[in-house]
Amino acid sequence: SQQGEEDPQALSIQEGENATMNCSYKTSINNLQWYRQNSGRGLVHLILIRSNEREKHSGRLRVTLDTSKKSSSLLITASRAADTASYFCATGDGTASKLTFGTGTRLQVTL
Amino acid sequence: DAGVIQSPRHEVTEMGQEVTLRCKPISGHNSLFWYRQTMMRGLELLIYFNNNVPIDDSGMPEDRFSAKMPNASFSTLKIQPSEPRDSAVYFCASSSNRQGGTEAFFGQGTRLTVV
């Protein structure tokens, strides 16, 4: 079963705009991670935020975590056509690194 | 490091045949995961190992599926007999399982088609 639900399922924006994706989960977590998947490829890790952290940045990425609401958001600033991909959140239970993925958001960035 | 290596990249087989998918995790990683991805069900965790020991196989769909990890550098996922509904992309991933969690590194996947 899937732990997380991403919202929206699909997002289409123009290059230069910001893209925001949300993730909700059900059970307590140790950490939450965001991954990217280009069509036909494996997933690539973007960023990890621990349960005691509220915000984290990496380049053009900004992730927030609200454990009281069991939700996280991924913001991609100044999007580029190369950001076109599916983005997944994954929750880690911490005890044995079990990672459970959400349903994903398909992001399309047009020129 | 070459990353997580999966083989084959593509597999087409007839219903009823045995299928074996292979995975070589990143050296030094002690957690290994098998996932299945389909349009209908998304990315499903089938089984994961810590230090070569299966920890949670609750995601394995049925007895036709089995997974082994005989040593730290090799794992297999076997489907016997295969059915058309097993058609999917199967991913192997590995991580170093540190306290607080670490990122998982994915292979390129095996695209399985059962006809």
Image (cartoon, coloured by chain):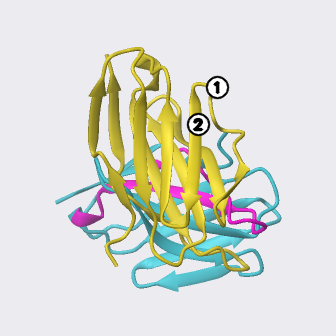
Q: Tell me which residue sits at (25%, 68%) in the image.
A: A80
Q: Amino acid at mark 1?
A: Asp
Q: Quadrant location of the N terminus of chain A?
A: top right
Q: Check disc 2: other Cα within 10 Å, few if <14, some if 14-19, many if 20+.
A: some
Mark 1 surroundings within 10 Å by alpha-carbon count, few (fewer than 14), some (14 through 19), many (20 or more): few
Residue B64 sits in which quadrant?
Answer: top right
**Measured along the vertical axis of the image, is residue B15 above or below residue B73?**
above
Contact between marks 1 and 2 (CB within 8 A): the answer is yes
Q: Which residue is painted at 58% across and 82% down in the image?
A: A56
In the rendered image, residue A72, in percent from the top left (x then y), is placed at 64, 64
Subunit under mark 2: B
Which residue is label 1 attached to?
Answer: B63
In-front residue for pair B87/A23:
B87
Give the color of chain A as drawn: cyan
Spatial CA span between label 1 and label 2: 7 Å
Q: Is residue A106 left or right of residue B41?
A: left
Left or right, residue B76 beside residue A48: left
The residue range painted magenta reads: A82-105
Q: Element under label 2?
A: strand
Q: Amino acid at mark 2?
A: Ser
Residue B71: x percent and y percent? 55, 62
